[in-house]
Image (cartoon, coloured by chain):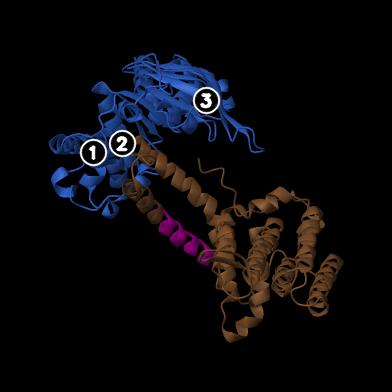
Amino acid sequence: MSLELKHVTYTYSAGSAFQATALDDISLTIEDGEFVALVGHTGCGKSTLVQHLNGLLKPTSGQVLLDGQDINGEGINRRELRQKVGLVFQYPEYQLFEETVAKDIAFGPKNQGLSADEVDRRVRRAMEHVHLNYDKLVERSPFELSGGQMRRVAIAGVLAMEPKVLVLDEPTAGLDPRGRDRILGMVRELHREGTTVVMVSHSMEDVASLATRMVVLSHGRLATQGAPREVFKQRELMAEAGLDIPEAAKLCQALIARGVPLPEDLYLQDELREHLAQLWKEARA
Amino acid sequence: MMTNITLGQYYPVDSPVHRLDPRVKIVLTLALIVCVFLAHSLIGYALIFAFIFFTARLAKIPFKTVLKGIKPLRFILILTFVLNLFFSTAGNDLIRIGSVRITDQGLRQSVHYSLRLLFLVMGTSLMTLTTSPIMLSDGMELLLSPLKKLHFPAHELAMMMSIALRFIPTLMEEADKIMKAQMARGADFETGNLLARAKAMVPLLVPLFVSAFRRAGDLAMAMESRCYHGGEGRTRLRTLKLTKQDTVACLLVAGLLLLIILEGMLLPKGWLL
């Protein structure tokens, strides 16, 4: 299942005094099985872009293609489309509404018209995916849970539709480190199982260890894209886009500047640690 | 889909009418309403119409915009006219077909009532078009403040009004977001019969209420942390001052009121309706 954006431009309140271009001629392909990280400064158009991926917003001009088919064209079943491309909004816990966790997670599958047995199976699986104890939590009210648990219930609500492409808009915003690690671990697992993932994030640390490709947006335009290693090398471009680079990459570059012989493109803590340990051993020997 | 709803109907331009003190505008609008009810003939209504028309001109508001305020009321207007026309039995018959009668009194009443309704809406929308909601609630508070002696919560009322106004766009945005999130889970807000649609609103309304209460709690906390303790001893950012323009406006409306009263006294009743 590949997603392709072709020259997508989106203008808010077109024709009025408040007209603002949120996306400017974005062309982008997301291949099956990729883990794409979408990064950029606040207001760069990330959230607008992800809403184009499942047809919640229609491009002012340009096209969004799912397996070669225009998703805003005639004869497209929107419900089916939104099942295939699951979108988890920012702070998704604010969308919970049902009396019990089970009912809330079942909302999506029920809208798909699945049988009661199948809905139940999916609720179980989704809760397993997000590491929520089915027997303990399933009959609880979602409003009694902790913030991190609520977020996981909301994500389970999207996972229960078993989407081929999972789009997450800042899934770790406002969570404590443990909650963050839980969510990221879960996303990593889903990607391993074959789900295509698109994740919007502010945190370069999160992105660095997970993404197979990074897409950098700046002021509604595509600034650059590529493997994290390639993108993090372009330090100036990242700074221009209002973004940081991972701490490991920063440390590595600072050490190089002081004459430590390290490769220029390190950005993961593990690899930096290995290199430094190696250097230390060599110096002692 | 919800961003195109403008807040209230304030028409933001700079004009002498916009610059008037909101207190004065509220009082003058009340005076205009009195005029509308005192008018006895088409001459009186013509005077009121002329006044509204020229005020709109002075306020740089296209007359079309003033008329737009009537649109939601068009059915009530038509109903008022038709009911009074066909169901008044007093007076002499003008037309009689079977049991359907149209009497001269009925015609008079239907014309009067619909014109009154029309001018009421036009006059008040002229005020809301030229006064921002914040100014309006400020003016309201000051006008009602003498009632504080009778323990009337004028300040609290105005504060509630401004907070409510402040949160309308926020809640709209929130509603839009929740709607989209539920649509992403396959919710359908647009098709189905009335019952199905009402049911489809539950996934929107529950989170919206939850977040409204959360916001209210947060705001109360934030206000208290900044030492808010009600209106006592509170000074204001915009102090309202009466100017020459306010005096002129008062004189103009007083003139209109005088003319309307004279019209009622001098013209014999029933002359020109």
For disc 1, the marked residue is A110
Q: Is residue A100 left or right of residue B245?
A: left
Label 2 is placed on what type of residue? Answer: Ile
- For label 1, the crowd category at 10 Å Cα-Cα, with few meaning under 14, some 14 to 19 and many 20 or more, is many
Instruction: From this view, report whether residue A34 is shown above or below residue A119.
Output: above
Residue A183 - label = 2
Mark 3 or mark 1, earlier in chain: 1
Q: Position of residue B236 (x, y in %)?
A: 68, 67
Q: Is residue B269 magenta?
A: no
Q: Position of residue A156 (x, y in %)?
A: 26, 38
Label 3 is placed on what type of residue? Answer: Leu
Mark 2 or mark 3, earlier in chain: 2
Disc nearest the viewer among 2 and 1: 1
Q: Nearer the viewer, residue A4 or B95?
A: B95
Q: State the CA–CA distance, disc 3 to disc 1.
A: 36 Å
Which chain does brown denote in the image? B
Q: Nearer the viewer, residue B19 or B258?
A: B258
Q: Quadrant of residue A35?
A: top left
Q: Is residue B214 magenta?
A: yes
Residue A217 - label = 3
Q: Residue at x 38, y 30 (%)?
A: A206
Circle 2 chain: A
Which chain does blue denote in the image? A
Label 1 is placed on what type of residue? Answer: Lys
Q: Quadrant of residue A178?
A: top left
The span shown in magenta is B211-224
Q: Is residue B69 left or right of residue A148?
A: right
Q: Position of residue B204 (x, y in %)?
A: 38, 48
Task: Let me know if marks 3 and 1 both belong to one chain.
Answer: yes
